[in-house]
Image: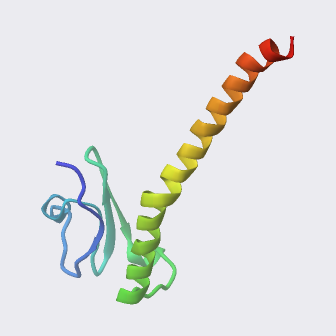
Amino acid sequence: EGFQNLAVIDPNGEISDLEKYHTLMLINNSYVVVGNGESIQTTPLKEFPEISLDYPKMHQFSQTLLFVAHYAIPFTAGYFVLTGLVSFFIWRFLPEFLL
C-alpha cells in the first residue's frame, strides 16, 4: 500500500500514475505532481528554476539519503538514548554514593 519510490520521472506520466508507480512524486514534461494519499498537488515546471537531472547526480543523492536513513539516524537516536540513560543513572544514584 505504501510508497515504494520517492520520485519517478516519466515524461508522459499522468496524475493517475502516482498509484501505478507507488510514488510520492511524479515529474513529467509539464508538471511536478505530489500526492500524499489524501490530496494531490500539481505545480508547473516553469515555476521551478532551471535545473538538470542526470543519472549520476540522482544516484549520488539517493546514496546520501540511504546513508542517512541507515546509519546517521539510528546513530543519532542511539546517542540520545544512551545520553538519557547515563544522565538518569547519574542523577538517580550518584547522590546516594556521595552521602
The quarter of the picture where the C terminus appears is top right
- Residue 3: horizontal and vertical position, in percent? 24, 55
Q: Find the residue positioned furthest to the right.
A: 99
Residue 18, picture quadrant: bottom left
Please give left or right for residue 78 compared with residue 91 in the image: left
Residue at 68% from the left image edge and 24% from the top image edge: 89
In front of the other: 42 or 95: 95
Q: Is residue 75 above or below residue 87?
A: below
Would you say residue 54 is visible in this rendering?
no
Q: Is residue 33 left or right of residue 68?
A: left
Give above or below for 75 relative to 90.
Answer: below
Residue 56 position, x and y percent, is 40, 88
Name the foreground residue: 49 vs 68: 68
Whether residue 18 is visible to the viewer of this picture, yes or no, is: yes
Give the residue drawn at x 75%, y 21%: 91
Q: Report the colour scheme.
A: rainbow
Residue 94's spot in the image, x, y percent?
78, 20
Q: Nearer the viewer, residue 92 or 45?
A: 92
Please tell me which residue is depicted at 67% across the width and 32% down the height of the picture. 86
Where residue 43 sits, quadrant-wise, is: bottom left
